[in-house]
Amino acid sequence: MIGKECYAEINSTLDALLAEKKVLVAVHRGAWGGNIVENTIPSCRLCREMGGDIFECDVASSTDGVLYAFHDGTERRNLNRSDNIKTMSSQEVDSLVYNNCIYEPSGVHVERFEDIVRYFCHGEIFNIDRAWDILPQLTAALDKYPHALKQAIIKTHVVPEQLQFLNDYPTKYMYMPIVYNMDEVRQVLSYPTLNVVGMEIITDSKDNDIFQDENIRFIRDQNLYVWANVIKLGSLDKHVLFAGLDDDVALLDDPDKAWGEAIRKGANVLQTDWPLQLSRFRDQYCAK
């Protein structure tokens, strides 16, 4: 069982998926490339066809309160704009067109978050990122779609105000904190009515306390999944998210040295940019 017993019905779809597959493939902004753009219905649909079990959706709000599936801070790369999407009106956002992967106009507009929630209504699990500063607005939007209760996983950093909001909110959406150390793990666990289903571990070193076997085992023993980011975002130190176990190592050297080692470490949700390759590896690994 994932999470607290009192929330078993809410968590049942995720729980069944983990029971079936043992290790889940989460996909970073969906599957994007060519003229398929990140954080869109096509990218989310395609990643599932490539073996993904969970898709990530970034969320930001316009100045007039419309939610968009967009990773703020990527405006220059994606939209040829220097200003943050959060400073734009919905009319302005709706007029923007994404670049594709060769920086040509894609013909694709920024999608409204509620369009994505409305489209994926058949048990697809999705993780909501970067909406931590607009939780009241986010939860109000999700409340319009009853199916979202069993599908949406809200993610935030360990910020008391955000934890308290979700702890007190009457609709018990699934929740995953981003944790860097065991103090943060224990802080999250102290909230009695927070529907925690897993924890995203960030560590740049195998020496950090949160990467130690006994601490990962402690998290799993709380009926929680451990989410490892095996995505490779770049070459800087800040891009090391799970102690160097990443997609580049898996694809260019040996998948068992990265994906396999992450699974052996105790991670049972791996976020990747390469869902087809990881899902094939996962299936073979878990069949042993």
Image (cartoon, rainbow, N blue to C red):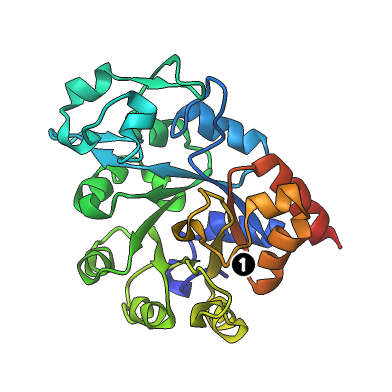
* Horizontal side, residue 117 vs residue 60: left or right: right
Q: Please name the residue that numbered disc 1 is placed on.
A: 267
Residue ID at (60%, 47%)? 53
Q: Quadrant of residue 85?
A: top left
Location of residue 257 with respect to 207 vertically, above or below: above
Q: Residues within 10 Å of mark 1 (few under 14, many from 20)?
A: many
Label 1: which secondary element: loop
288 or 232, nearer to the observer: 232
Location of residue 246 with respect to 276 vertically, above or below: below
Residue 214 percent coordinates (x, y): 59, 86
Residue ID at (56%, 51%)? 231
* Horizontal side, residue 150 vs residue 259: left or right: left
Location of residue 199 with respect to 143 vertically, above or below: below
Residue ID at (33%, 25%)? 79
Residue 174 percent coordinates (x, y): 41, 59
Query: Which residue sits furthest left?
Result: 64
Residue 264 percent coordinates (x, y): 71, 71
